[in-house]
Amino acid sequence: SSELTQDPAVSVALGQTVRITCQGDSLRNYYASWYQQKPGQAPVLVIYGKNNRPSGIPDRFSGSSSRNTASLTITGAQAEDEADYYCNSRDSSGDHWVFGGGTKLTVL
Amino acid sequence: QVQLVQSGAEVKKPGASVKVSCKASGYTFTSYYIHWVRQAPGQGLEWMGIINPSGGSTSYAQKFQGRVTMTRDTSTSTVYMQLSSLRSEDTAVYYCAREDYDNFDYWGQGTLVTVSS
Protein backbone atom coordinates (compact mmCIF):
# COMPACT_ATOMS: atom_id res chain seq x y z
CA SER A 1 0.00 0.00 0.00
CA SER A 2 1.16 3.54 -0.70
CA GLU A 3 -1.13 5.21 1.78
CA LEU A 4 -0.44 7.00 5.03
CA THR A 5 -3.40 7.36 7.38
CA GLN A 6 -3.86 10.15 9.92
CA ASP A 7 -6.72 11.13 12.21
CA PRO A 8 -8.46 14.14 10.64
CA ALA A 9 -8.62 16.19 13.82
CA VAL A 10 -7.14 16.22 17.31
CA SER A 11 -7.51 18.69 20.17
CA VAL A 12 -5.36 19.42 23.19
CA ALA A 13 -5.66 21.71 26.18
CA LEU A 14 -3.10 24.48 26.40
CA GLY A 15 0.08 23.19 28.05
CA GLN A 16 -0.87 19.54 27.77
CA THR A 17 0.70 16.78 25.66
CA VAL A 18 -0.71 15.55 22.38
CA ARG A 19 0.30 12.73 20.06
CA ILE A 20 -0.51 12.72 16.35
CA THR A 21 -0.14 9.39 14.58
CA CYS A 22 0.48 8.21 11.04
CA GLN A 23 0.00 4.64 9.88
CA GLY A 24 1.20 2.95 6.73
CA ASP A 25 3.00 -0.13 5.46
CA SER A 26 5.91 1.91 4.08
CA LEU A 27 6.72 3.09 7.61
CA ARG A 28 8.08 -0.38 8.34
CA ASN A 29 10.97 0.51 6.01
CA TYR A 30 11.16 4.29 5.95
CA TYR A 31 11.09 7.02 8.56
CA ALA A 32 8.31 9.55 8.42
CA SER A 33 8.93 13.26 8.34
CA TRP A 34 6.41 15.71 9.80
CA TYR A 35 5.30 19.09 8.48
CA GLN A 36 3.38 21.88 10.17
CA GLN A 37 1.20 24.08 7.99
CA LYS A 38 -0.61 27.20 9.13
CA PRO A 39 -3.34 28.84 7.02
CA GLY A 40 -2.02 30.55 3.93
CA GLN A 41 1.54 29.39 4.51
CA ALA A 42 3.85 26.78 3.02
CA PRO A 43 4.50 23.66 5.10
CA VAL A 44 7.43 23.66 7.52
CA LEU A 45 9.50 20.60 8.41
CA VAL A 46 9.31 19.97 12.16
CA ILE A 47 10.56 16.39 12.64
CA TYR A 48 12.60 14.05 10.43
CA GLY A 49 14.46 10.77 10.69
CA LYS A 50 14.44 8.83 13.93
CA ASN A 51 13.71 11.95 16.00
CA ASN A 52 15.44 15.04 14.62
CA ARG A 53 14.38 18.67 14.71
CA PRO A 54 15.54 21.26 12.19
CA SER A 55 17.15 24.36 13.58
CA GLY A 56 14.56 26.69 15.09
CA ILE A 57 11.97 24.04 15.90
CA PRO A 58 11.16 24.01 19.64
CA ASP A 59 12.17 20.96 21.63
CA ARG A 60 8.56 20.36 22.67
CA PHE A 61 8.23 18.63 19.27
CA SER A 62 9.44 15.04 19.14
CA GLY A 63 8.98 11.99 16.94
CA SER A 64 8.92 8.24 17.35
CA SER A 65 8.01 5.16 15.37
CA SER A 66 7.02 1.56 15.94
CA ARG A 67 6.29 -1.03 13.27
CA ASN A 68 3.94 0.67 10.81
CA THR A 69 3.15 3.74 12.91
CA ALA A 70 4.95 7.04 13.25
CA SER A 71 4.05 9.56 15.92
CA LEU A 72 4.55 13.27 16.44
CA THR A 73 4.34 14.38 20.07
CA ILE A 74 3.99 17.94 21.29
CA THR A 75 4.81 18.18 24.98
CA GLY A 76 3.29 21.30 26.50
CA ALA A 77 1.28 22.48 23.49
CA GLN A 78 1.20 26.22 22.86
CA ALA A 79 -1.41 28.31 21.13
CA GLU A 80 0.94 28.82 18.19
CA ASP A 81 1.05 25.06 17.61
CA GLU A 82 -2.50 25.12 16.30
CA ALA A 83 -2.08 24.06 12.68
CA ASP A 84 -2.42 21.21 10.22
CA TYR A 85 0.19 18.46 10.54
CA TYR A 86 1.17 16.11 7.72
CA CYS A 87 3.33 13.01 7.75
CA ASN A 88 5.32 12.00 4.69
CA SER A 89 7.56 9.17 3.63
CA ARG A 90 8.59 7.19 0.60
CA ASP A 91 5.97 4.72 -0.50
CA SER A 92 6.43 0.95 -0.39
CA SER A 93 8.19 0.93 -3.76
CA GLY A 94 10.75 3.41 -2.48
CA ASP A 95 10.58 5.37 -5.74
CA HIS A 96 7.75 7.74 -4.90
CA TRP A 97 6.67 9.77 -1.90
CA VAL A 98 3.31 9.99 -0.19
CA PHE A 99 1.66 12.32 2.32
CA GLY A 100 -0.84 11.46 5.00
CA GLY A 101 -4.22 13.14 4.80
CA GLY A 102 -3.29 15.61 7.52
CA THR A 103 -4.39 16.20 11.11
CA LYS A 104 -5.93 19.48 12.20
CA LEU A 105 -4.67 20.28 15.69
CA THR A 106 -6.80 22.56 17.86
CA VAL A 107 -5.30 23.99 21.07
CA LEU A 108 -8.08 24.70 23.55
CA GLN B 1 20.27 31.55 2.85
CA VAL B 2 18.41 28.88 0.93
CA GLN B 3 15.48 30.22 -1.06
CA LEU B 4 13.04 28.75 -3.52
CA VAL B 5 11.11 31.48 -5.32
CA GLN B 6 8.18 30.48 -7.50
CA SER B 7 6.45 32.24 -10.33
CA GLY B 8 3.20 34.09 -9.90
CA ALA B 9 -0.41 33.02 -9.93
CA GLU B 10 -1.95 31.73 -13.13
CA VAL B 11 -5.49 31.50 -14.48
CA LYS B 12 -6.02 28.93 -17.21
CA LYS B 13 -8.94 27.56 -19.19
CA PRO B 14 -9.79 23.86 -19.16
CA GLY B 15 -7.66 21.93 -21.61
CA ALA B 16 -4.78 24.40 -21.47
CA SER B 17 -1.32 23.89 -19.99
CA VAL B 18 0.51 25.72 -17.22
CA LYS B 19 4.23 26.00 -16.52
CA VAL B 20 5.33 26.97 -13.01
CA SER B 21 8.93 27.91 -12.23
CA CYS B 22 10.95 27.52 -9.04
CA LYS B 23 14.23 29.44 -8.83
CA ALA B 24 16.73 28.17 -6.27
CA SER B 25 19.43 30.19 -4.54
CA GLY B 26 21.71 29.97 -1.54
CA TYR B 27 23.01 26.45 -2.20
CA THR B 28 24.51 24.27 -4.93
CA PHE B 29 21.57 23.75 -7.26
CA THR B 30 22.68 20.36 -8.60
CA SER B 31 23.25 18.82 -5.17
CA TYR B 32 19.61 18.46 -4.07
CA TYR B 33 16.55 16.92 -5.66
CA ILE B 34 13.46 19.07 -6.09
CA HIS B 35 9.92 17.79 -5.55
CA TRP B 36 6.58 19.25 -6.58
CA VAL B 37 3.61 19.07 -4.21
CA ARG B 38 0.15 20.49 -4.71
CA GLN B 39 -2.73 21.39 -2.42
CA ALA B 40 -6.28 21.85 -3.66
CA PRO B 41 -8.44 24.36 -1.75
CA GLY B 42 -9.23 23.03 1.71
CA GLN B 43 -7.47 19.74 0.97
CA GLY B 44 -4.26 18.01 1.96
CA LEU B 45 -0.83 17.85 0.39
CA GLU B 46 -0.36 15.70 -2.69
CA TRP B 47 3.02 14.58 -4.01
CA MET B 48 3.40 15.02 -7.77
CA GLY B 49 6.94 14.07 -8.64
CA ILE B 50 10.67 14.63 -8.34
CA ILE B 51 13.47 15.93 -10.53
CA ASN B 52 17.21 15.53 -10.15
CA PRO B 53 18.63 18.93 -11.11
CA SER B 54 22.00 17.36 -11.85
CA GLY B 55 21.07 14.93 -14.61
CA GLY B 56 17.47 15.96 -15.20
CA SER B 57 16.00 12.54 -14.41
CA THR B 58 12.43 12.54 -13.20
CA SER B 59 9.85 10.33 -11.52
CA TYR B 60 6.17 11.15 -11.44
CA ALA B 61 3.23 10.01 -9.34
CA GLN B 62 1.06 7.56 -11.26
CA LYS B 63 -1.84 9.99 -11.10
CA PHE B 64 0.02 12.60 -13.17
CA GLN B 65 1.87 10.33 -15.61
CA GLY B 66 1.38 11.59 -19.14
CA ARG B 67 0.24 15.06 -18.03
CA VAL B 68 3.17 16.41 -16.04
CA THR B 69 6.67 17.30 -17.19
CA MET B 70 9.43 18.50 -14.89
CA THR B 71 12.53 20.12 -16.33
CA ARG B 72 15.45 22.17 -15.14
CA ASP B 73 17.80 24.89 -16.36
CA THR B 74 21.12 24.67 -14.58
CA SER B 75 22.28 28.00 -16.02
CA THR B 76 19.59 29.80 -14.02
CA SER B 77 19.15 27.29 -11.16
CA THR B 78 15.49 26.98 -12.04
CA VAL B 79 13.17 24.00 -12.05
CA TYR B 80 9.93 23.94 -14.03
CA MET B 81 6.71 21.96 -13.66
CA GLN B 82 4.35 21.84 -16.63
CA LEU B 83 0.90 20.33 -16.28
CA SER B 84 -1.20 19.83 -19.39
CA SER B 85 -4.85 19.10 -20.21
CA LEU B 86 -5.91 21.13 -17.22
CA ARG B 87 -9.29 20.53 -15.61
CA SER B 88 -11.10 22.25 -12.77
CA GLU B 89 -9.80 19.64 -10.30
CA ASP B 90 -6.27 20.92 -10.97
CA THR B 91 -7.08 24.19 -9.26
CA ALA B 92 -4.57 24.21 -6.42
CA VAL B 93 -1.51 25.80 -4.88
CA TYR B 94 1.59 24.19 -6.35
CA TYR B 95 4.76 24.05 -4.23
CA CYS B 96 8.33 23.13 -5.04
CA ALA B 97 10.39 21.71 -2.18
CA ARG B 98 14.04 20.81 -1.78
CA GLU B 99 14.79 17.30 -0.58
CA ASP B 100 17.56 16.57 1.91
CA TYR B 101 17.80 12.85 2.65
CA ASP B 102 14.12 12.12 2.12
CA ASN B 103 12.98 15.27 3.92
CA PHE B 104 11.58 18.44 2.38
CA ASP B 105 13.63 21.03 4.22
CA TYR B 106 12.88 24.14 2.16
CA TRP B 107 9.70 25.06 0.32
CA GLY B 108 8.77 27.66 -2.23
CA GLN B 109 6.05 30.15 -1.37
CA GLY B 110 3.51 28.37 -3.56
CA THR B 111 1.84 29.26 -6.86
CA LEU B 112 -1.93 29.34 -7.17
CA VAL B 113 -3.17 27.87 -10.42
CA THR B 114 -6.85 28.44 -11.12
CA VAL B 115 -8.55 26.48 -13.87
CA SER B 116 -11.81 28.07 -14.91
CA SER B 117 -13.76 28.65 -18.08
Image: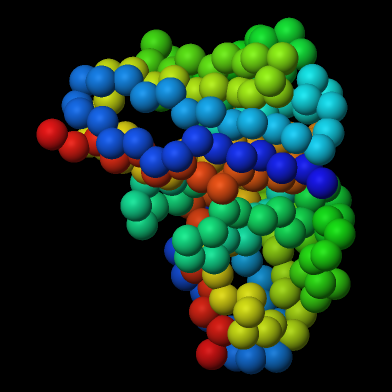
The image quarter containing residue B36 is: top right
Q: Which colour scheme is used?
A: rainbow
The residue depicted at 72 percent of the width and 74 percent of the height is A74
Q: Quadrant of the C terminus of chain A?
A: bottom right
Q: Position of residue B61 (x, y in %)?
A: 50, 24
Residue sitting at the far front: B76
Q: Quadrant of the N terminus of chain A?
A: top right
Q: Where is residue A84 in the image (x, y as percent from the top left)?
A: 53, 64
Q: Please tell me whether residue A41 is drawn above or below residue B48 in the rendered image.
A: below
Q: Please tell me whether residue A77 is drawn above or below residue A15 in the rendered image.
A: above
Q: Where is residue B111 in the image (x, y as percent from the top left)?
A: 46, 41
Left or right: A58 with respect to A98? right
Q: Please tell me whether residue B19 is drawn above or below residue A8 in the rendered image.
A: above
Total number of numbered labels? 0
Q: Where is residue A57 in the image (x, y as percent from the top left)?
A: 80, 66
The residue depicted at 78 percent of the width and 61 percent of the height is A63
Left or right: B72 with respect to B38? right
Q: Which of B31 and B43 is in front in this view?
A: B31
The residue depicted at 36 percent of the width and 57 percent of the height is B42
Left or right: B35 with respect to B1? left
Left or right: B110 with respect to B24? left
Whether residue B59 appears in this view of the structure is yes
Q: Nearer the viewer, residue B87 or A94?
A: B87
The residue depicted at 21 percent of the width and 20 percent of the height is B15
